[in-house]
Amino acid sequence: MFSRIKTKVILSSIFLIILSTVIPNYILIKQLRENFEERSIFMLNSSTEMLIHGLFTEMMKGDKKNIQGVIDALGAVEGVDNIRIFNEEGIILYASDHEEIEENLVKVSPFHETLQDIHERSITPIDEEGIYSVTEPIKNELRCQSCHKERNNIAYLDIDSDFTSSEYIFYFGSALMPFLGLIVLIILIIGLILIFNHFINTPLKRLILGLQNVENENLNVSLPTTKKDELGVVFNHFNSMVSNLKSSKEKIDELHFEELQRMNRLKTVGELTSQMAHEINNHSAIIMSRSDYLKLEANEEPILKKYAEDLNVIMDRLDKITNITGNILRHSKKRSHKLTRLDLLKIIERSITILTTLLNKKNIKIHFGNNAQNTIIYADEIQIEQALLNLIKNSVEAIDADGVIIIELNPLNSKKLELKITDTGSGIDEETKKHIYSPFFTSKANKEGTGLGLYIVKNICANNAVEIDFSSEAGKGTTFKLTFNLHV
């Protein structure tokens, strides 16, 4: 689930939204609440100071009746809920709510559970909404003792705060902000999912489905190209790619069919050649036996002695014909892949012998040098010989005439043996190098080659644990390197 792009994008977006909106919003609300609490406490302190000043002023005038008027005036101020003056027993003497007078403070305001040990101003929260209450003893100052004797406290003052209309709106607005933020977050997430599905997820699904069709060799697939965004560009490239693949596949199928037809013809020619070689061997054997008989007779009959040298030439030519037909028959046999201990030196010499006619026809010289003492390898004899024949034949075909092919056999170490085949031919250009081992690829004019030679060589090397590499420069020839494992 978490490996899908959709999940990653949505989760990352949610994290960024929370990081950029929820956290700053929380910090802002927290700061505003702290400011609000500071303002409420400041207001209570100011109201308390004002009320105490007014009370002392009226009491010094000796006008106790006006104390209630001062409380009523301050109690009418917005933001002040209740003002009470009570005695040590908790009996309310004066109150902004006249119905509370002569009632017990704890009874009318259960918040005040303890009234003992009130020695100084105390501000405490009434609830979690930011409502505070201030309680302060009214001290019996020296100027008041003429009336109130030597009592420590004349009475006690209690003021409860309340929200102003603007504070009420602010407080409950800030309380709703988290819920509003949550709603905004949900809307953003839903919107993000819908936008992602419409603009990214749905086109990606189409692209994935198209790629699966191509993977299943269905090249009759096309993606809509109405969009002008980046995905529209991708769709256009996809359609172009599929069109090119379809065109290439048709050409490859056509070329493959032609090559199969050609390989079938070559197979037929090979079978006929094998039969012809067998027949030639039969006739050669008869001629050889008759020549051998005549050679023996020449030792006895003086009249035949003058033909002895001619008989030797006939015998030598028949021996060469037998070698040629023997190689044809050996290569025409169908056999399984079989690794054996064999001498690479002998295979090289035999391959050169087989191609002697082709080399002489183009006046190409072969220089063969062996610098290795141990040339024993473990491989399939027929396959290795086929690979060497293909490589040497390619070198011959790359040379117009009067060229040179250098074959070197060098030990790399006690376990490796390197065979280098270098020609002075036309070389290989950079573009051809990219496709040199591809099946049915040929750079020869008029489709003279099957395009399978180096493809087969590459596979033979893989089958026999032989490393193959080449270097070439156009117009300066080519070198192939084969690295064999020595059989110790």
Image: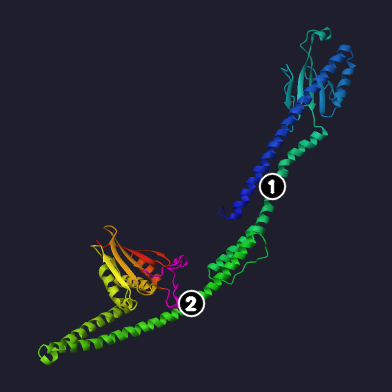
Label 2 packing within 10 angstroms: few (<14), some (14-19), many (20+) = few
Secondary structure under tag 1 reads helix
The residue under label 1 is: 185
Q: Main secondary structure of the magenta part?
A: loop
Q: Is residue 252 above or below residue 120?
A: below
**Residue 255 tag number:** 2
Q: Is residue 224 left or right of residue 290?
A: right
**Residue 236 tag number:** none
The residue closer to the viewer here, 250 or 339, is: 250
At 78% from the left and 24% from the top, the residue drawn is 44
Q: Is residue 420 left or right of residue 50?
A: left
Q: Is residue 61 visible?
A: yes
The residue closer to the viewer here, 242 or 376, is: 376
Q: Is residue 41 magenta?
A: no
Q: Is residue 429 magenta?
A: yes
Label 1 packing within 10 angstroms: few (<14), some (14-19), many (20+) = some
Q: Is residue 21 left or right of residue 297?
A: right
| Label 1–label 2 contact, CB within 8 A | no
- Give the amino acid type for the residue marked by disc 2 in the picture: Leu
The residue closer to the viewer here, 140 or 462, is: 462
Task: Read off the magenta span.
Answer: 424-451
Q: Is residue 338 visible?
A: no
Judged from this view, the residue extending furthest toward the front is 402
**Which quarter of the rendering shows the C terminus?**
bottom left
- Give the amino acid type for the residue marked by disc 1 in the picture: Leu
For the residues labelled 1 and 2, the Cα–Cα distance comes to 61 Å
The residue closer to the viewer here, 151 or 321, is: 321
Secondary structure under tag 2 reads helix
Q: Quadrant of residue 241?
A: bottom right
At 66% from the left and 58% from the top, the residue drawn is 199
Q: Give the number of the mark in front: 1 or 2.
A: 2
